[in-house]
Image: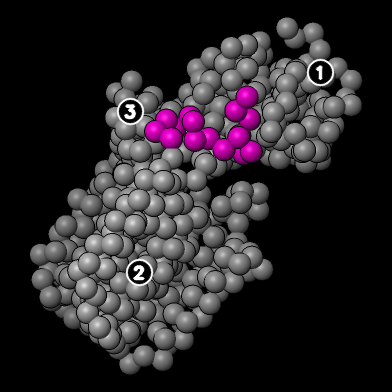
Amino acid sequence: MFGLFRAMSLPLGDPDQFWHLRAGEYIVAHMAVPMTDPFSFTMAGQPWTAHEWLYEVIMYLVYRLGQRWGLMILNLVLLGVAMGFAWAWARLRGGGKFASAVWVAVAALLMMPFVAFRPQVASYALFAVFLYLLERGRDRPAFYWLLPPLMVLWANMHASFVLGLGLVFLEVLLAIRDPGRLRTLGAVGAAVLIAAMVNPHGWHLLVYSLTSASSITMRENIVEWASPDFKSPYGIVMALFIFVTAFRVLRSTRIRAGDIILLVVFTYMFLSSARYAPYLLLWGAAANGFLTPSVRLPVAVPWWLAAAVTVALAVAVGTLLPPYSLAAGVDRREFPVDIVDYLAVHPPDGPLFNDYGWGGYLTWRLWPTTRVFVDGRADLYLEGSVFDDYLKTVHLQVDPQVVFAHYGVRWVLVHRQSALARYLAVAPGWVLVKQDEAGSLYRKAGSP
């Protein structure tokens, strides 16, 4: 948990956490889930599937109470639930206390790149809870009936709720030779499926989740949706984790058919997109935990040593504690903080073309005075030609002037070292207004 705290203490660099906060504020202010896009000028009024609305509300309310520290506490609680239930699942399967804890700690360290203030963190917790309850229900079927209400929560927090459906339906399939268990799981499965439809979008959310997860455009153009880079240090460690897990699972006599299926499914998901690593890590850590025999510490840990370590960690936490204000912790190397400060005082007089990764930050800082061209809601912009137009423009695959004229763009904010910034530096009719560590702001000649 200390490693996860350290990861959340670093300067804020994730682009999506900002628009999640703004969306939560919007929902609280209007007391309704938006069905159309309120934040961009390119897709204004077009249908938007706000599938994370419930967590965005929770996130905003926690932020309003405790700023960044509140969000850190929320994340730590949810990650603690995820780790705790992964450990409990390993224990149910016969894993030793210490060995299971060690493997869960390994998973926690490898999950550090995925602990931004975003709804996915709630999904990790619910995923681990589902694993535990499906195992616990084998001996006490009453536990199965906790799954439908939890599915209602999951389906209103993140589109990954389909993983929960998959886990339940796999249990139904594997119970086919046990008529009594099959009847119970069949009823639970039907209830869970109905529960998944209890959301503002009904059954359409299931379709949305499956189509978004299979989008080739997002995997080719968005870093978090891309396949893992096995040449990087993190990729090498993950490859080792997969190899060790697969080796131990496939050679064990304690493994069920469902374990092998889940090993294949979660490995495939991770190979398809690195953003699925936490699910593979949670399941894999628990699997390694219950495949590891009980390990006794050679000596008992004296109370004074445990107390000293606790005090040392508390001091370390205190020294690493980030600024209370979320705004003060924004990474200026990643976001155009100074330029946005300027735009907050001098709003653009016309549409602004912005970098995809900055759309959420701009929405958080400048909406509703300024609306973005594009932001982290790639699924929304894929519905029309906006995302395609954006990609072709920033990569100079089309004449940017044609795209700007089509959308009426009069201001452009992009990375200062980008190809588009270099193009605008010499393009006639464009004037450099301001630069900072991250970006360059241009305006069309004739704009005030």
Please say whether residue 200 is visible from this viewpoint. no
Residue type at mark 3: give it. Arg
Point 45% across, 60% down: residue = 111
Q: Callout 3 environment at 10 Å: few (<14), some (14 to 19), or many (20+)?
A: some
Q: Nearer the viewer, mark 3 or mark 1?
A: 3
Distance from Cα at disc 3 to Cα at disc 1: 39 Å
Report the front residue among 350 and 51: 350
**Tag shown at residue 138:** none
Q: Quadrant of the C terminus?
A: top right
In the image: residue 173, left or right of residue 218: left
Residue identified by numbered label 2: 104
Local secondary structure at mark 3: helix
Specify the amino acid type for callout 2.
Answer: Val
Residue at coordinates 24% horizontally, 62% vertically from top-left?
307
Whole-percent x, y for residue 270 in the image: 51, 65
Picture layout, residue 55 above or below residue 404: below
Q: Which mark sits nearer the N-terminus, 1 or 2? A: 2
Which residue corresponds to the image point at 30% horizontal and 72% vertical from the top-left? Answer: 101
Rendered location of residue 146, percent (x, y):
16, 57
Q: Which mark is residue 64?
A: 3
Asked if the stretch drawn in magenta spans residue 44, the answer is no
SS class of the residue under badge 1?
strand
Lower sequence index among marks 2 and 3: 3
State the residue position of label 1: 431
Instruction: Residue 85: name its quadrant.
Output: bottom left
Depth check, front residue: 395 or 299: 299
Magenta span: 323-338
326 drawn magenta:
yes
